[in-house]
Amino acid sequence: MEYEAVIGLEIHVQLKTQTKMFCGCANQYGAEPNTNVCPICLGYPGALPVPNEEAIIQTIVAGRMLKCEIPDYCEFDRKNYFYPDMPKNYQTSQLHHTLCTGGEVTLYKYAFPKEVQEAAYASADKRIRLNHIHLEEDVAKSTHHEDHSRIDFNRAGTPLMEIVTEADLRSADEAYAFLKSLQQVLIYGNVSDADMDKGQMRCDVNISVRQKGTEAFGTKCEIKNMNTISGVRRAIQYEIPRQIDVVSSGREIRQHTRRWNDGLGETTFMRDKEDSHDYRYFACPDLQPFRTRPILFDTAGERIPELPSDKKSRFMQELDLSDYQAEILASDKRLADYFESALAATQESVSIANYLINDYLASEPDLDAPALPATHFAEVAELVKADAISSKQAKQVITEMLENGGQPKAIVEAKGLVQLSDEATLEPLCREAIHKNPRSVEDIKSGKTSAINSLKGYVMKQTRGKANPRKVDEILQKLLS
Ligand code: ADP
Ligand code: ZN
Ligand code: MG
């Protein structure tokens, strides 16, 4: 019997606001513990919250980029439970009237893990539907030590966006590609840096298995608090065969929560469904319901940037890039910006795309802080265009530039990479080539056109590779006809 996995993700994303969700404390990572706190985020009795408009705007921008509906009427709800990391004994969240509903994320081919990109082509461009996005406040951060625990309230009350997918994912690789694609959209929209290492994006994985070809979902398990994308992939790779093993041997999966042990590479039991909370949600009486229309047509509307998919189309239509080139360059905002800043200094878009994809990316550059200005690549393209160097020499210049830095023109001079393009020098050499290779000339005349390569080879040898091959070809054709 064949089984398939059914996976849905719940992703928490920290927003890039100056201040917390309901108070004026700084929303800052890495500050001295318990310094960004006040009566509101510490949950003192009687303290009243004021919603952070910027967090609402950023959530709407994210929702628009992810093709969500933005209902006009929104509310904050109280989610009631007791836990030391949440001093109010409820978390202000949204349940009934969330900021965004529906939406989707497209899985890009190049978002899949490198080693499976070709095989994953079947899932590329697949759309994963979102259920909704809501806005809530984060809880404090606790760390557990041998005989005590510590708690830092700096994170308590910071704005947190939760993105909930439909259970449309079918494999570990799709979940990986989903998170990579989502990350790019969030970075593009400037709503989060979505850096999982810094806890800016965290993810719960809901997963079940069912017989292939059946409709109904199986019973799910939830793997909590994943904090790397590769961890999500490995946890799912572990969990699918585990569940298939249970189901195919006739046993039943009981709904429960699991945790991922990265060191051991396995998921383990955490708690039963019976232990799950009854949150007793109700609309927060301290916060007024609000309308999104004014925000949507004002600030948020202006901030919605060009989407990666629109950028890709523009690169293809206006800059003549291939589907492959456009997708790679548009899929990462940092790379797209780098590409476009090179184009400020040249119109050779296709050459630049080639240099960036074949040479620059292969050198595994730091995209956050590029060692070379993008205009260096423009300079190389211009040198080729002006016939000052050949495309082969351009490759040499780029290799040198990536390894040791330096200005393209200076490298060309230092390495003596001048290309001979002037007819006055090349024509006598071409005549000589014809004169010294009568057999090749015969071959060419009898229709074996590839024999011209030996004539070209002669000129290249005489010039120690510096002749412009296109020019040599042109002169030889002219002399032979
Ligand atoms: P819960 O009430 O347990 O929180 P939800 O219905 O809110 O469950 O769904 C939470 C996430 O789990 C969503 O991403 C949803 O798509 C996913 N999900 C729901 N049921 C299943 C299932 N049987 N198998 C896999 N994922 C599921
Ligand atoms: Zn505060
Ligand atoms: Mg739920």
Image (cartoon, rainbow, N blue to C red):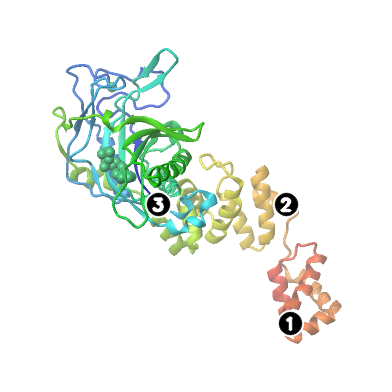
Where is mark 2, residue-wise?
413
For label 3, the SS is: strand
For the residue marked with disc 3, what is the amino acid? Tyr
Label located before the other in sequence (2 or 1): 2
Vertical placement of 423 versus 268: above or below? below
Question: Considering only order in the chain, which callout, 2 or 3, is on the residue closer to the N terminus?
Answer: 3
Q: Dot 3 corresponds to which residue?
A: 3
Amino acid carrying mark 1 in the image: Lys
The residue at the far bottom in this view is: 446
Spatial separation of the CA atoms under disc 3 and disc 1: 59 Å
Q: Amino acid at mark 2?
A: Glu
**Residue plotted at (30% across, 28% down):** 20
Q: Is mark 1 within 8 Å of ligand 1?
A: no
Residue 391 placement, left or right of 287:
right
> From the image, which quarter does the N terminus lie in?
bottom left
Q: Is residue 23 visible?
A: yes
Query: Which quarter of the figure has residue 49?
Result: top left
Mark 2 Cα within 10 Å, few/some/many (few <14, many 20+)? few
Q: Residue at x 66, y 61 (%)?
A: 391
Q: Earlier in the sequence, mark 3 or mark 1?
A: 3
Residue labelled with disc 1: 448
Local packing at callout 3 (Cα closer than 10 Å; few below 14, some 14-19, many 20+) is some
State the image coordinates of residue 290 (x, y, percent, origin top left): 16, 38
Residue 135 location in percent, x, y? 26, 36
